[in-house]
Image (cartoon, helix red, strand yellow):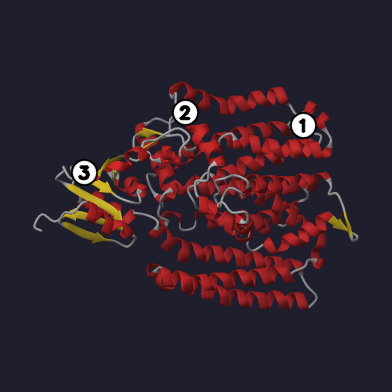
Amino acid sequence: MSKKSWLIFWAAAIFLVFFLNSSLLITDSVESNYSLTAKEMVLSGNWISPQIYGRFWYDKPIFVYWMIALGFKFFGFTEFAARFFPALTGLLGLLLATWGGKKLYSEKVGFYSGVIILTTIQFFLISKSILTDGALFFFFNGTLLFFYLAYSGVNKKYYYGTYAFSALATLTKGPIGFLLPGLVIVLFLLWERNWKELRKAKLVSGTLLFLVLAGPWYITMIYLHQDFLGSFLGTHNFLRATVSEHPKDNVIYYYLLINMLAFFPWVGFLPGMLKNTLRKAHKWIAPAAREKFLLLWVFVIFFFYQNMATKYITYTYPIFLPLAYLVAAYFIEQKERLAFKGVLAYNLFFFGILTIAAQWIKSRNSDLVDNVQQIFILALCYFLIYFIGCFAIWKRGGNWLKTVTAIAIAGFCFNVIAAQVICQPLLRLRSAYFAALYLKEQVSEDTYIVSSGRYPTSAVFYSGRRIVKLIEANEVADYIPKAYSWSVKDVMPFSTYKKAEEIKNVAAIVYEDDVAEFIKNMPRHWQKHEFNDKWVVLTENRQG
């Protein structure tokens, strides 16, 4: 690959991951939980024990909080700061992909692997979100990549990379950081019938390296907090695996559907890639060791998370690296023989569905008004032109490189447009930013601020004010955190309506759908303040 190609690739990657990050509001509830925890870490000076609302909590290990907190130390408590290191880990993931593809196959495979990941919807979303998944993608996949480089080559020192990356994955996501890569490795050695390789795997020195990197924080937490193991391992790991946090998502087709959308615009190549890998000369074949490992990498992760009770759209993101390697290698091997019909048909279908979805969203949510509808209509027109161009290239004898380039440019452009026209208005609706500014600037410090229904953690982050969630007296027992129960996540300050009635100077921040119920439960002369989002601030009208 030419230096110009690499320069364009990295310029596009840097632009995409940082584009508009300073204007993408921090949303509820996941982003605001991470951001508020990191903010309290900076303000308290306690960089060991994660805390939120002034209380210790153990939802995730420490690494993600360190990342976000460092962003705050460098750039202040801003959206750009909160999104800085997630964006940086996105770039590190691309660096791992391109370097690993070169090591496993060739420079061309490394380059196209990077292009594939960069232009997917999932990479775009995760690299711009305040989540653990970008860092986990880097560390988790680094664990498996370094294992295979050591296994397949003469330089067994690569095994140390396996232990180091798995330690960092464990500091990012917990035991899954070493257990799931370990399962992939064990199944691969079983398939290869090569247990002798373990003698070369630096088991003793590598395990010591893992413990040196991952052990100190866990040991310190166990020493400082007697409830750490029960809450962290019991609730946030075992309970998440066995009891669904979101039962409606616990369906058999969940990750199949998610990944068909998330791997756009490349998912249409997967059938051809699998056929090319598993079938030669009209016969089914056993893949080579390298392809065995990559396929196991994909299917173990996919089926593991599919069988977990709790499902999130980002859990299977690590499979994008081995998929990118396999698809890129398929490009290089097949070249002019690539089958584009299915790819173009899938992409047309995808944008057709999004155009229909825009009409539905507009009818259900007037706040998005014309922006979403217009972007999908424009995108559909753009992609119709794009498809005609690709089809013309293909009919005139085919040029696989031009067609793949057109698909990559189309995917990149869609993500750039989506950042401005889709993400900004959607994130505005999922953040209490404007209401929080009103609380910070217009509501006196001695005011008792309450909420009801949905809890606006983002308002606590932006305003710096304590917000108490009000519940009925008969609900108190349900909000007291219990071991092996999802109630352990209810760590926000709460009280009852009855106690709040005794307080004179009260203001409320309530989601618009919950306002009527709140006023019914706490009748006063409320003055309503509405903003450019879904949250409403209620202050007492002293003259009412």
Task: Give the CA distance from mark 2 to mark 3.
Answer: 33 Å
- Quarter residue 503 falls in: top left
Return the residue at label 2.
228
Disc 2 to disc 3: CB gap under 8 Å: no
Circle 2: element type: helix
| Quadrant position of residue 43 | top left
Q: Residue 422 in the image: state x and y as whole percent.
A: 47, 64
Q: Position of residue 340 (x, y in %)?
A: 74, 69
Q: Which residue is mark 3?
A: 498
User: Which residue occupies 30% across, 44% down?
Assistant: 464
Q: Residue furthest front?
A: 474
Residue 194 seen anywhere in this rendered image of the structure: yes
What quarter of the picture does the C terminus occupy? bottom left
Observer-nearest residue: 95 or 249? 249
Q: Are marks 3 and 1 in contact (CB under 8 Å)?
A: no
Q: Earlier in the sequence, mark 2 or mark 3?
A: 2
* Position of residue 348 in the picture relative to residue 285 (left or right): left
| Residue named by callout 1 | 156
Image quadrant containing the N terminus: bottom right
Q: Name the amino acid type tagged 1.
A: Lys
Choose mark 3 or mark 1, whichever is in front: 3
Q: Is residue 29 above or below residue 486?
A: below
Instruction: Tell which of 337 and 30 is nearer to you.
Output: 30
Crowd class of label 3 (few under 14; some 14 to 19; many from 20; radius 10 Å): some
Residue at the (62%, 54%) spot, across then down = 252
